[in-house]
Amino acid sequence: MIGVVHTKWDVDFSFSVGSAETHEVDVHWTQWWGEITVAVDGEPALRERHPLGMRSLRRYTLTVGHAERHDVVIEKRKARLAGGVRAQAFRAVVDGDLVAEH
């Protein structure tokens, strides 16, 4: 099995979604593997891997909630020059409103 590699560029952050029906969204980005995982209330909701990703902007979208539904967009930006070995910038947008930046 391939071991887990942690770097100083890995990102972990969380934010809440909803008012009457509240959900906790956890985001984890692993720089070494180019992998993002998103969990909603502790359950896996999204996992993508882009180890050689060339895009400077990548968007991940999901819908959160059952009775109270919300559109969630997580944006990852990287520098064009040596972006793979520099920190990535993240933004979380819920229903068009910025709720978190990392």
Image: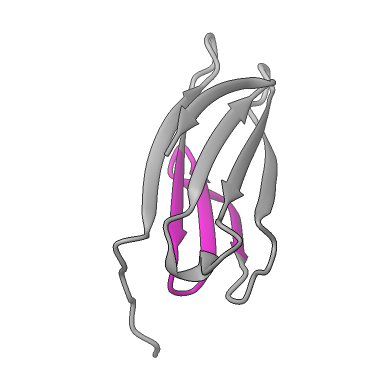
* 64 to 97, vertically: above or below: below
Q: 65 or 49: which is nearer to us? A: 49
- The reply to whether residue 70 is in sight is yes
- The reply to whether residue 23 is in sight is no
Q: 63 or 72: which is nearer to us? A: 72
| Residue ID at (43%, 62%) | 86
Instruction: Give the x, y percent position of residue 30.
Output: 43, 64
Q: Residue 87: name its quadrant.
A: bottom left
Q: Which residue is situated farthest in the bottom direction here? A: 1
Instruction: Give the x, y percent position of residue 11.
Output: 39, 52
Instruction: Give the x, y percent position of residue 9.
Output: 36, 60
| Residue ID at (39%, 88%) | 2
Mostly what secondary structure, the magenta segment? strand
Q: Quadrant of the N terminus?
A: bottom left
Q: Which residue is situated farthest in the top direction here? A: 20
Q: Quadrant of the C terminus?
A: top left
| Residue ID at (44%, 69%) | 85
Q: In the image, which residues are magenta?
A: 26-48
- Residue 33 among magenta residues: yes
Q: 85 or 95: which is nearer to us? A: 85
* 95 to 26, vertically: above or below: above
Q: Is residue 62 left or right of residue 100?
A: right
- Residue 74 among magenta residues: no
Instruction: Give the x, y percent position of residue 88.
Output: 48, 53
* 37 to 49, vertically: above or below: above
| Residue ID at (51%, 56%) | 37
Q: Is residue 26 left or right of residue 79?
A: left
All told, the count of numbered labels is 0
Query: Which color scheme is applied?
Result: one colour
